[in-house]
Each structure stands twice: as C-alpha cells, then as structure tokens.
Image: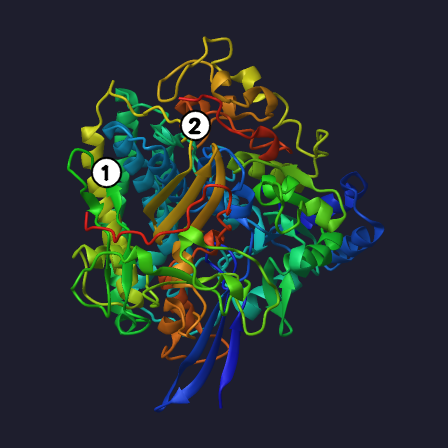
C-alpha cells in the first residue's frame, strides 16, 4: 500500500471526525493540503522508557505484500522524519526534524511508557534551547497536533514492565500521558506485521475497529489458545520435550489475545508454543503483573 | 576559545544517550578537550524484580534490552542455576550458544550497517537516513560499495533472527531459554533449517561484512589512532563448550594498559561508584553483591543515570575488542577502527564455531534439567557477554523469592560518567583528544561514540539486596580463574 503525503492529508481531512481529530488539527491539515507538497506521509517515532525491542522486531518484517521489508517501509511507504535509533541526523539537527515535521500532518508513534517520576526526568529525550526535554513534555507537545497516535508495544500501550509494581518511575501509557486516545499495538515485542498493517490501515483512512483495550480487533480478536494447534492435546508435564498443551506449565494462551498461532513469527519460522515455551501474555493490559509467576511447573 | 557542543539525542544507538563535548584548539589542532556521557533513562528494573518468583527474572530481564535480550536471559538463568545448583545438559548448553550466536550476528550486522556506517558514507537520500550533518565525507568507490550493501545487510540481520527463532520460538525476546536449559530439543528438521540460515550468514559475514569493515579501516586509516580511551579491557568470557572442561570460546580476563598480559578478573574489587550519578552518595562504591539504589534527582554535580563500575578503582572498556584482545585473536590496537575490525572478525569466529556446535547437537538427548528453586537462602551470579560487552546478574533468593537482584551492563562500563575519584569513563576518555573540524557538526565525536556500540537500553540499576532475615553480609568473591 503506497500513499503520498498529499493523499494522506486528504484522507485525514475527509475521515477526520472518524479519527477523532480536533477542529484545529483538521484546519491545519486543510492548510497543508492547500499548500500542496508531495512525498510520503510523515511519522514521528518517540522512544519512551523503552528497550528498543519494538524497533528490532519491526526490522524483522518480511512479506509478499508491500512494504515487503523494513527498507521498503522507510524508502517507499512512510516518511520516518524522526526515529532516534535509526536516523542519520543527531543532536540539534535531529530535534529540528521534529519541529519541521510537526508543522504538517504526522502520525505520532511511541515505544516505551512515559515516566512521570522525578518531574519526568527519569526519561529525557533531547536537549532544546539549552535544556533537557522529558518524554512526558515531548508527548504532551506533539500529541495534540498528531493526525493519529499509535502505541507500539505493551509499554507504550499499557505501561508494561517498567510500570509493574511498584512502578518505580511512575510510568504512564502513551494515551494516559497524552490525555488522548491512542491506537494500541501491544506485544513484547509486537509482531512487525501488526505494526505495518495498522499503519497501512491508518494511512488508507480505514476506520479501524478497536477492542475494549484500544487494539485493532482484527489482530487481537481471538485468544491464542483458541487457534493453538496443541489445543486439546494431552498436557506437557515438563519442559524441553516437544508436543503437548503447555497450560499446566503456565501457558497464558487462554487469557491472551493475539494471532501468533496462525501468523507465526520471523518469516513463519516458529512461535513461542512451537518451541515449547509458554505464552506469557505479552499482548495483554495485565502484562506482566497479572501473569506472574510465569512458570507453574516445579521441576 | 572553548566551544561546548551538546549532542542530544545521540542517535543510532540503542536507548537514550546525551554527549557533551568541549572543543578547543590545543597544540594547533582543534579537538575535544573534555567529554561527558549521560544516560538519560532510568527504569528501576531491579526494584520490580524484588519479591517475585526467581524464574520470572529470566522472562523479565531480557526486556531490559530488545537488542541483547538473549544475553540477559542467559545471565539470569545462569545466576539462578548457580543458586539452585542445577547443571544444564550439554545439548542445552550448545543450544544456548546457538541462540546467543544468532543474536551476536544480528547485533553486529545491525550495528555496522544501520547504526555506525552513516558516520562515514552517504546513505539513501530519504528519511530516516537523511538529512545528516553536511560534512566532507571521503570519496572512495569502496565506500559506495558499502552503502550499496544496506539492503543485503537488512536481509542478513533479519535472517540471523530467523535462525535464532528455529530454537527460540521467536526473536527478539525468545523465551525458549529457561532456568535449567532450553525448551526446544534438536530435531533433524530444526538442525537443517538452522544450518541453511547459518551458511547464508557465514557467506555474508566472510564475503561482505568483513571486507566492508576492512575497506572502511583503510579509507579511514587515521581512525586507527583516534578514540583509544583508557586501554583497560575486561571480559567475563562466553560460549561455554560442553565436554571440554571449563573451556569457553572466549575465556575471561582483564588487560591493563593495552598490554599482552592477561590477568584474572578481580571480581572482589568491582565497585559501582555514584559521585556523578543520580543516586544517593550513601550508596557509593558498593560491590554489586551488596549494592544499593536510591535514585536522587537532581544532585549536585551528577550528570547521568548510569553508575560508574570500576575494577580496582579503574575504568575498563568492554566489548568485542576486549574479548578478542584477551583471547589473543586481535591485538592490532585500540581505536575506533580496531573496535569495528574486532567486531567483524568476532562475527566470523562465532559463526564458524556455531557450525561446530550445530554438528555436535545430539537428537534425542536432553536439553533441560529439572530446575527447582532453592528452599533456603541462596546466592547466584551469572556472568556472560552481551554482543557489546561484559554483563553480570547477581541474585539473592530467600524462601523461594527474589530478595535482591543486581545487574551491571556493558554500557554501564563503557559509557559511565566520572567515578568517585573524578576519573572519566572509557568512552569519555576515548572522546578526549579527538580532532574536530566543525564544532557544530562533530561527526568525528560521533564516530568515537558509535565505535563502542552503546546500548543505553541496558543502562539499568541496582536494587538493594534486601537485608532480610538470614541474609549474610557480603564476603569478597574469589577471583575468577582463567577458564
């Protein structure tokens, strides 16, 4: 799926209400549209309290459908104006890219949750005008002007591991920090297809159907257990042996919604249960707190 | 007159890094005369681990870093296995090597082609690669050839993860590694799939990656005397080879002053210093075994969320160059280009060893030993090597729960701030003396920083090992013997 910036802005304007855009944003988009300008739709990608795993997972994208891989995604699908792990620019020039990009239409993506402890200074994202800017400030300044807000990964979606009890840095989800709804693509890490598919729907102006947790229902519709090829097979009694339902060893497949058993991971190589590793519930709001301890088998 | 340049964010690293450099003319050369590296993220991982089931650490700690999760998973399971006195079967240890090796390959390829190379060659003229600082990059056909390998490198990195997923289930963040061993046993089918990827990667490393790095080192030969740093090197050793005694592919050791004398790792003298870190001064100079973390922000002259780990009060550089130097595989020098060369040669050495490990897997033999949490007070230490250097996990278990957990990551060593004696960290020292042509676009400094492959995602800090009932005061650890 390929769009230029102009088509994207037009889609944003026409489906503005559906995307929940404020009148101000729509007005600005209309201005951008009138001003013309070609190119790919812009994405600003922030790193909150993250581990970089979401981006590494995205780099594992491979598909017969465009974008076929991560190089195709960046070269031909989106204008990734800011992404600290990947961008050529550093320092002031990097910060300038955000400022320029935020003048037009953009999708705001964040991986990692947003710490609020120490005045937000547990996570500083750049220096501007001689002072450090926190992730919290960055989100609050960029979210209101965004055409869409995307949480990539469980930390950005729900707080994730850094927000697990006792939440030492008072981490909020992106949506909580921004005070605005976000489309959530949880997973620790999320499957690259989930991120690319959601981005593509968004750029195409498709009205995404979200579940109660803000996840695209098409991706997170069924429990892992429901589609698991080991469903109904005799229980596995110990680790390190092929076959058997892993429920008695701690598998969270029945409580976890994701399409891993049918989509498979890493170019359809395998998935957790196929390697006899329990599903740990990583796409769920309760991850990790409600799934601990992860292992039930006692040797 | 001195110019202060702030690089924030330092991009193309994992995680959050800020670097401040002071540039001044000295002996007729405009150069870096002072440097400060700041880790700008604190998550408090170890605090989150306190009171949890010990085995949860092997799922949670890999999430410290999505670039080297396999290493955290291994350090954590090794610490728990020590505490519980569990020995992983040979097949399981071989599989761990193969999983770790897969991630070494993806990490090294990622670092060179996606993180480091844009400091030397012009990338695609589109975001996110462009814009970059307008600097006078050297023109050489060998450099354009490297730029032309970007798409191939993206594929090779991806395939390294597909290879790891054969036994890991998925990458990154596979959890087929658990205390006691690996969950996926070798089958003829898995071995064949793994071998197919490995052959492809060996070919890429040998015929593309290594020649590209050698070409870069020729064109930028002056960078073989830039970015030397402290000259002290440390490795904990990694890739245990079963049935060969304690032998590892990389043995542990330290080297001081870039010498060829390898000494045992003086673990008892390991201390984390916080005079310039945002932690309470009462927690200064503690060994990880009884370390404490009390975040304190802001604090006087402190400027980083990283602590400053030191051995015998000295800074040590960690990473592929340290591993290759200590093991006598590479001793040409310590500099920006030597780090890149050692990393590439290491990728080749690891990939070749992986072929042997794959051949030694025994279908039908166990990969997992039953693990049971220790009933009484127990302590375990897991020392291994992430792609970017020495990684240690320390755990105290009391009544089947984690009482204290401590992690010292490679980037804490390399990107550490000044220690309590005011001595700058290895990366800071490496920056000092770097010639800079344009203080507003100090690409030369960026080259020094990127040569360490910093991973700030890993920059997490210690939890106070609880002073719970029955916890013995810490005793000095024996020195590690050369394995």
Between the residue at mark 1 and the residue at mark 2, the CA separation in whole angstroms equals: 23 Å
Label 1: which residue? B354
Quarter of the image for residue B331 reads bottom left
Q: Secondary structure at mark 1?
A: helix
Query: In this image, B233 relative to A168: left or right?
Result: left
Front-lying residue, B429 or B196: B429
- Residue at 42% across, 68% down: B446
Q: Position of residue B283 (x, y in %)?
A: 50, 61
Front-lying residue, B180 or B446: B180
Q: Position of residue A24 (x, y in %)?
A: 82, 54
Q: Is residue A282 above or below residue B317?
A: above
- How are the residues colored? rainbow
Residues behind callouts 1 and 2 on a single chain: no
Query: In this image, A3 relative to A297: left or right?
Result: right
Q: Is residue A53 something that shows in the picture? A: yes
Query: In this image, A140 relative to B112: left or right?
Result: right
Q: Position of residue A84 (x, y in %)?
A: 53, 57
| Closer to the eye: label 1 or 2 | 1
What crowding class fits label 2: few (fewer than 14 Cα within 10 Å), some (14-19), or many (20 or more)?
some
Q: Is residue A221 above or below residue B154?
A: above
- Residue at 33% across, 71% down: B227
Q: Position of residue A134 (x, y in %)?
A: 64, 60
Chain hosting mark 2 = A
Chain hosting mark 1 = B
Label 2: which residue? A268
């Amino acid at each position: 799926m390929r769009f230029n910036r102009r088509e994207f802005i037009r889609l944003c304007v026409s489906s503005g209400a559906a995307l929940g855009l404020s009148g101000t944003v729509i007005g600005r988009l209309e201005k951008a549209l009138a001003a013309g300008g070609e190119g790919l739709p812009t994405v600003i990608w922030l790193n909150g309290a993250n581990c970089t795993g979401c981006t590494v997972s995205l780099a594992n994208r491979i598909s017969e459908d465009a974008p076929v891989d991560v190089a195709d995604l960046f070269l031909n699908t989106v204008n990734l104006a800011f992404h600290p792990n990947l961008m050529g620019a550093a320092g002031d020039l990097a910060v300038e890219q955000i400022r320029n990009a935020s003048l037009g239409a953009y999708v705001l993506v964040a991986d990692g949750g947003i710490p609020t402890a120490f005045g937000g200074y547990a996570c500083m994202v750049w220096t501007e005008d001689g002072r450090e800017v926190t992730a919290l400030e960055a989100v609050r300044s960029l979210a209101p002007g965004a055409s869409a807000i995307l949480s990539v990964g469980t930390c950005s979606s729900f707080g994730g591991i850094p927000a697990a009890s006792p939440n030492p840095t008072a981490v909020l989800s992106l949506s909580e920090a921004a005070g605005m709804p976000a489309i959530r693509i949880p997973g620790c890490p999320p499957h690259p297809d989930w991120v690319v598919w959601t981005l593509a729907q968004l750029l195409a102006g498709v009205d995404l159907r979200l579940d109660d947790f803000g996840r695209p229902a098409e991706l997170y519709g069924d429990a892992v257990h429901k589609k698991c090829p080991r469903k109904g097979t005799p229980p596995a009694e110990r680790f390190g042996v092929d076959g058997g339902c892993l429920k008695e060893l701690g598998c969270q497949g029945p409580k976890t919604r994701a399409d891993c058993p049918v989509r498979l991971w890493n170019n359809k190589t395998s998935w957790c249960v196929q390697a006899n590793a329990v599903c740990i519930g990583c796409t769920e709001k309760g991850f990790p707190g409600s799934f601990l301890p992860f292992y039930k088998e006692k040797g | 007159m001195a110019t202060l340049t702030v690089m924030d964010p330092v991009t193309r690293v994992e995680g959050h890094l800020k670097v401040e450099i002071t540039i001044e003319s000295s002996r007729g050369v405009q150069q870096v005369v002072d440097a400060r590296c700041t880790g700008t993220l604190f998550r408090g991982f170890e605090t989150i681990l306190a009171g949890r089931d010990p085995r949860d650490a092997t799922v949670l700690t890999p999430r410290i870093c999505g670039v080297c999760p396999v290493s955290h998973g291994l350090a954590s399971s090794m610490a728990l296995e020590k505490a519980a006195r569990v020995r992983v079967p040979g097949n399981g240890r071989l599989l761990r090597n193969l999983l770790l090796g897969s991630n070494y390959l993806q990490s090294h390829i990622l670092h060179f082609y996606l993180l480091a190379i844009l400091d030397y060659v012009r990338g695609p003229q589109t975001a996110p690669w462009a814009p970059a600082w307008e600097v006078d990059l050297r023109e050489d056909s060998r450099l354009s050839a490297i730029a032309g390998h970007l798409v191939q490198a993206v594929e090779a990195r991806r395939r390294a993860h597909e290879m790891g997923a054969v036994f890991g289930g998925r990458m990154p963040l596979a959890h087929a590694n658990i205390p006691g061993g690996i969950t996926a046993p070798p089958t003829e089918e898995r071995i064949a799939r793994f071998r197919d990827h490995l052959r492809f990667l060996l070919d890429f490393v040998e015929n593309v990656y290594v020649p590209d790095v050698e070409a870069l080192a020729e064109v930028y030969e002056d960078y073989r005397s830039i970015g030397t740093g402290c000259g002290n090197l440390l490795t904990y050793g990694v890739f245990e080879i079963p049935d060969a005694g304690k032998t590892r592919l990389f043995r542990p050791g330290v080297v001081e002053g870039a010498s060829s004398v390898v000494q045992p790792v003086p673990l008892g003298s390991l201390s984390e210093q916080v005079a310039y870190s945002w932690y309470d001064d009462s927690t200064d100079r503690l060994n990880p075994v009884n370390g404490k973390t009390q975040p304190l922000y802001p604090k006087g002259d402190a400027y980083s969320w990283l602590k400053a780990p030191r051995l015998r009060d000295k800074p040590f550089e960690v990473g592929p160059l340290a591993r290759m130097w200590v093991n006598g595989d590479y001793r040409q020098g310590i500099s920006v280009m030597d780090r890149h060369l050692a990393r590439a040669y290491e990728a080749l050495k690891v990939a070749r060893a992986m072929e042997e490990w794959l051949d030694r897997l025994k279908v039908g033999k166990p990969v997992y030993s039953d693990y049971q949490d220790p009933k009484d007070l127990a302590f375990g230490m897991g020392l291994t090597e992430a792609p970017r250097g020495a990684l240690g996990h320390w755990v105290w278990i009391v009544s089947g729960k984690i009482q204290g957990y401590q992690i010292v990551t490679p980037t804490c060593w390399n990107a550490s701030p000044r220690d309590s004696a005011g001595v700058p960290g290895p990366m800071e020292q490496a920056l000092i003396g770097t010639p800079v042509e344009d203080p507003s676009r100090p690409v030369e400094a960026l080259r020094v920083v990127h040569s360490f492959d910093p991973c700030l995602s890993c920059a997490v800090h210690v939890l106070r090992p609880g002073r719970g009932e029955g916890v013995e005061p810490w005793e000095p650890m024996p020195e590690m013997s050369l394995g």
